[in-house]
Every structure is written in structure tokens, then in C-alpha cells.
Amino acid sequence: MKKPVITVIGSINMDLVTIASRVPSQGETILGEKFHLIPGGKGANQAVAAARLGAEVHMIGAVGTDAFGKELMNSLKREGIFVDHVKPVTHIETGVASITISEGDNRIIVVPGANHALCPEDVEQCEDVIAKSDVCLLQLEIPLLVVEKAVSLAKKHGVLVILNPAPAQPLPKSLLEQVDILTPNEHERDIILAGEDAQKFAHKLVVTEGARGVTMVKNGKPMRIPSFSVSVVDTTGAGDTFNGALAVALSKGMELEDACYFGNAAAALSVTKLGAQTGMPTEAEVRQFLEIKEGGSQ
């Protein structure tokens, strides 16, 4: 069976992860427990998730020519991701995310760096890649003009578009109308639809709700697809894993409901390990997990 082809257009960051027993209060210094450098960025995370789940993945983005940029490129290559269209930027550093993990939850500050050097002209040069894709997957850690250009090109060629609108910002109505599936969390949903008729776009929404699962619309009515109960180590990248898995499942012809169920399983497995990309499961691991869960109870 032919591999699904997914083009991911988005951020590539190095995650600077600090693990501590708690988050310090304002003006307070505490001792952390561990520190890790882990490849990340919402775009790269979703690309890795899709690649591990069996897709042919093409990454479009930008990194600096510094040490972080070189390591991130090598990391993507090791995952089997095509990086021909990742732009090297000499005048600005690779993007970074400072992540503090305590009690299984995370707080994140992102410095975009080279990610914001990506421009619409870069995406135009990748039109052939987008045109040959089953799914085009995007996020908002790159300039909005780039996202708009990518969506326009994808729709020109009849490619399914999934937009994970994070970090959230109000979006143009024209963009909302072109996107096939929006995957915000509850907070992001309220921001991206500010001033818009939420009912008009409800059929496009797959709202991620953490431990409660996701909510979508089926036959005009809200439907919740529950998550799976697992031991949580690190929630970083769970949403990215879900998006990558959703893209793979839809590209294989699954109905949206089944694709969300598959995405929930992948996301559940991802939070049982430290790090966004390091915790992302393979297709075989998700299938085995589902067999166990379906043989017993969720």
C-alpha cells in the first residue's frame, strides 16, 4: 500500500527542558532536577509524529546555521523526513522553546528566531511538493502570511488542509473558510473565532480537551471522543502527536471520528515519556495499544 504523503509547514525549534518539583513564584529561585535539549517546534513535532506513524513527510520551514539548526536538521533526517525545503538562515538564530515541567504539566516560552524568516515566496517555490500531498498540515508558529499562502496553494490543488491554530490569534475569515479542519484547544477556539459566527465553522472544528479527549461535530451535533487513561510523565507534544496522527489517519481514508480516536491513542502514548518528539509512538505501538485497550476497558 502506498504511503500517505503529508507536507508539514511550520516551526522547527530546540526545546530547552527543565524538570523541577514545582514552578517558582515571582522573584523566586529554586533548584531544578534535570535539564535536557530535545528537538521540538510544533511543525517539526507534527512531522515526526506523522513519519513515525508511517507517512512520507516533507518539511517546509527555516532554521539558523548555528549548532541547534544543524542538530535539528540531522534529527529530522534520522526520522526519514524530507528536508530539501527547510531554509537555512544566516542572519538569525534557530528558534528555541524554554519549557518547565513540574507535576506532569508544562509551561512554555517560544522565541521564534529563524521560523519568522520563512516567507510566502519560500512556500511558492514548494508548490509542486504541496500539490503531490494528501494532506497539508500547518500551525501558527510561523508568519500568518506564510500560512495563508500555503493554504491557498493547497486548496488550488485539492489538498486537504489541517490547521492547528497555536499559538492562537484571530484569523481572517478567508483563511477559516479555506481550511478543511481546525484543531484548536478550547482557549484557542475562542480566540480564532473571535468576531466570527462560531456555528458557521463548527463542522470544521476538532477541539482538543486534554484528558477529556476531543470534541467534533457529527450530523450537526457535538460529539466527544474520550481520551485514554495512562500514567502521565510529560504532556509536551501531546497535541502535536494528535495532529500528526489525525493527518495520517485522514490521508488513509478514515472517517473523522475514527481518525480522532486513532489520534487520541497516539497522544496518550506520547505523554508516557519525556519530551515532545522522544515520546511519539510508531504505528505498530498505537495498534498494539488499541488492541489492549479494546480488549479491556479504557
Image (tube, rainbow, N blue to C red):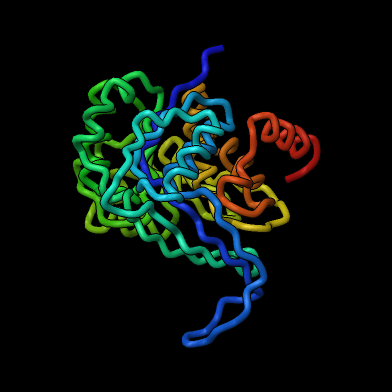
Quarter of the picture containing the C terminus is: top right
Judge by depth and name the residue closer to the eye, 255 or 35: 35
Judged from this view, the residue extending furthest toward the bottom is 27
Residue 182 in picture, x, y percent from top left: 38, 43
Residue 258 visible in the current orientation:
no
In this rendering, position of residue 93 left or right of residue 46:
left
Q: Residue at x 63, y 72 (%)?
A: 20
Judge by depth and name the residue closer to the eye, 11 or 158: 11
Residue 76 in picture, x, y percent from top left: 50, 36
Residue 264 in picture, x, y percent from top left: 59, 43
Judged from this view, the residue extending furthest toward the right is 296
Q: Which residue is drawn at 60% across and 53% down?
A: 275
Quarter of the picture containing the N terminus is: top right
In this rendering, position of residue 168 left or right of residue 215:
left
Marks counted in the figure total: 0
Q: Quadrant of residue 232?
A: bottom right
Judge by depth and name the residue closer to the eye, 45 or 179: 45
> Where is 115 relative to 133, above or below?
below
Q: Which residue is drawn at 52% across and 18% down?
A: 3
Q: In which quarter of the image is residue 139?
A: top left
Residue 220 in picture, x, y percent from top left: 41, 39
Q: Residue at x 58, y 66 (%)?
A: 18
> Where is 94 relative to 88, above or below?
below
Residue 81 visible in the current orientation:
yes
